[in-house]
Image (tube, rainbow, N blue to C red):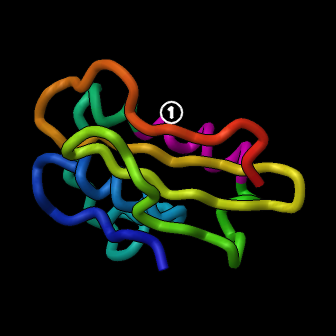
Amino acid sequence: MPVLVTLGRHHIDEFQAGFFNGVGFADQEDVIGIHNGIAPRELAVLRRVLAIERANAALLVSPQWEPYAPTLKYGIFASKFRGKDQVLWTIINHNDHDVNGRQMTVPFGIK
């Protein structure tokens, strides 16, 4: 079930939850016809998330989903979606600031 965007003014948390879990999200306008607006920054995030989800739809329904993969920094979360010959990692920064440097370690050739 997709994450439902609430009537709040900021939607980044809902976008991150849907992206991290590979479930997408639904705007209130899609459900009950109410639209409360999306800020330009949020729209940019939404476009990036949708492009990734559409390009990797088959991986996002994988029964081999592994949430909360180990990361190296506080506030950085990752999920792993395994396919037959591919792996998709969704990584989010849940901090209120940018985080630099390595975020996680992935062994070469991981399946």
Identify residue for label 1.
Answer: 48
Q: Which of 11 and 88 is in front in this view?
A: 88
Q: From the image, give the main secondary structure of the stretch colored magenta.
A: helix
Q: Which amino acid does label 1 sit on?
A: Arg
Provide residue 47's location: percent of width, then percent of height: 49, 34
**Residue closest to the far right:** 85
Q: Which of 88 and 33 is in front in this view?
A: 88
Splitting the image into 4 quarters, where does residue 108 fall?
top right
Splitting the image into 4 quarters, where does residue 45 fall?
top left
Provide residue 63's location: percent of width, then percent of height: 69, 78
Q: At 29% from the left edge and 58% from the top edge, which residue is drawn?
A: 14
Q: At 39% from the left edge and 74% from the top edge, which residue is drawn?
A: 31
Provide residue 62's location: percent of width, then percent of height: 71, 70
**Residue closest to the far front:** 107
Q: At 72% from the left edge and 57% from the top edge, which residue is drawn?
A: 57
Provide residue 42's location: percent of width, then percent of height: 30, 35
The image shows residue 36, relative to residue 4, as above or below, that is: above
Q: At 39% from the left edge and 26% from the top edge, which residue is drawn?
A: 102
The image shows residue 51, relative to residue 34, as above or below, that is: above
Q: How crowded is mark 1: few (under 14 residues within 10 Å), some or many (20 or more)?
A: few
Asked whether 14 falls inside the magenta stretch, the response is: no
User: Which segment did they paint magenta?
Assistant: 46-56
